[in-house]
Structures are given as C-alpha cells and as structure tokens.
Amino acid sequence: MNIFESSNAFVKQARYLTTSLLAAIVLLSGCQPNGSLSAADDAFSDIAPTYIEGVADAPADQTIATSVTAHSCQNDLVVKAFKSKQSDRQVKGCGTIIKALPDDNKGSRHQKILIELDGVSPKQTLLLVHNIDLAPRVADVSRGTALSFYGEYVYNNKGGLVHWTHHDPAARHQGGWIESGGVRYD
C-alpha cells in the first residue's frame, strides 16, 4: 500500500467516525431533522406506497439485528402529528401488529407492517414501512405481536405511516428502528 492509499483510507475512516459522532449527538440531543419530503414521498398517501431512499444501499451482510431492552411508549407524539396533519416528525411509539402486508419491492425493498397503537382512544392504526435493503427484516410479524418503533411520521387520513426505521449509511438522516421480541432491527 502506498502513501496515497494509506492516507485515503485514513481520511475515509475519519469521515466515518466524524459522521457517526455527529449523528449520535443529534440523536441524543433530541433534534429533529429539518427538510421536506420529496415528491416521491407523495406515494405514501396510500396504504401501499413505493418509497425510494435517497441514500446508497448497504450490503445486506453489514446490517444485523441486535438484542435490546424495551423502550417507553410515546404514542402521544404520533397522535398529535395525526390530529394536526403534520409530517416530517421523528416519533417513537408502540403497538400491536394487525397484519403484515406484502413487501413493496419497487425501488428499495420495504417490509410493511400495519399496527394498532397501544393505549390510544379512539383506536388508531399506523403503517410501518421498514427498508429491508438497509436493515434486517422484522422476524415475527404475526397478528397480536407487540413492537415499538422510532422513525419519521408521514400523515395520511388512515392514521399515517412511519418510515426511516433504519440507520442511514450516509448519515444524512436521523436513524430509526423497530423492536420486537427484545430484538432491534435497524
């Protein structure tokens, strides 16, 4: 390896570490990303959307599910965003699976899970749209399975949806996750 290759590798590693550190600071500070959804996100107004991430896909062998502890449920943020018809909001919540919908295989592949939010009256459903090109597939999606999530809320009149439930390998968007059965899928 010559000096140029060695310094190039060092620069790439330094950029990766800097980006990771900044992403962690944003996550821990509770900051929410600003920015609007692209025209492609308008497809989310239906229950079976196609969404193409604006980032490069990571190889499947670089993402693994990890064991975690349970997080507190904060469905009030989801309900507030739904009632005020707001989108582009980072939300955390929990619910029970109603149905696993067929995967969306157009563009980036997405696992779609329809849930009912826990502790919400009147009942409210929410569609989780989980990128399985960037994160592992949620293993147990049987009806009645409890799960929690963190991602970006997008309003629609059916209760809304949450996407960005995965890491962003380009570190341009706050990462999210889905947890089920003590396993985090991010």
Image (cartoon, grey):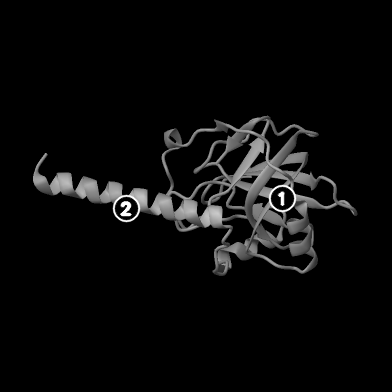
Q: Residue at x 72, y 43 (%)?
A: 72
The N terminus sits in image quarter: top left
In the rendered image, which residue does mark 1 sit on? 127
Q: Secondary structure at mark 1?
A: strand
Task: Name the residue rendered at 41%, 39% in the picture.
Answer: 59
- Observer-nearest of 45 and 15: 15
Q: Residue furthest right?
A: 122
Quadrant housing residue 160 = bottom right
Q: Quadrant of the C terminus?
A: top right
Vertical placement of residue 86 versus 104, above or below: below
Left or right of residue 68, residue 141 in this image: right
Residue of label 2: 15
- Residue 114 is tagged as none
The residue carrying pointer 2 sits among few (fewer than 14), some (14 to 19) or many (20 or more) residues within 10 Å by Cα, namely few
* Residue mark closest to the camera, 1 vs 2: 2
Q: Residues within 10 Å of mark 1 (few under 14, many from 20)?
A: many
Q: Left of 155 or right of it: where is 22?
A: left
Amino acid found under the numbered disc labelled 2: Arg
The residues tagged by marks 1 and 2 sit, at their Cα atoms, a distance apart of 34 Å
Residue 115: percent from left, percent from top: 76, 44
Give residue 36's position: percent from left, percent from top: 57, 69
Q: Residue at x 65, y 30 (%)?
A: 182
Q: In the image, what residue occupies the spot 54% across and 53% down? A: 27
Q: Is residue 64 left or right of residue 5?
A: right
Q: Is residue 163 visible?
A: yes
Q: Kindly identify the amino acid type of the residue bearing the numbered disc 1.
A: Leu
**Badges 1 and 2: C-beta atoms under 8 Å apart?**
no
The percent coordinates of residue 29 (x first, y second) are 55, 57
Q: Earlier in the sequence, mark 1 or mark 2?
A: 2
Q: Secondary structure at mark 2?
A: helix
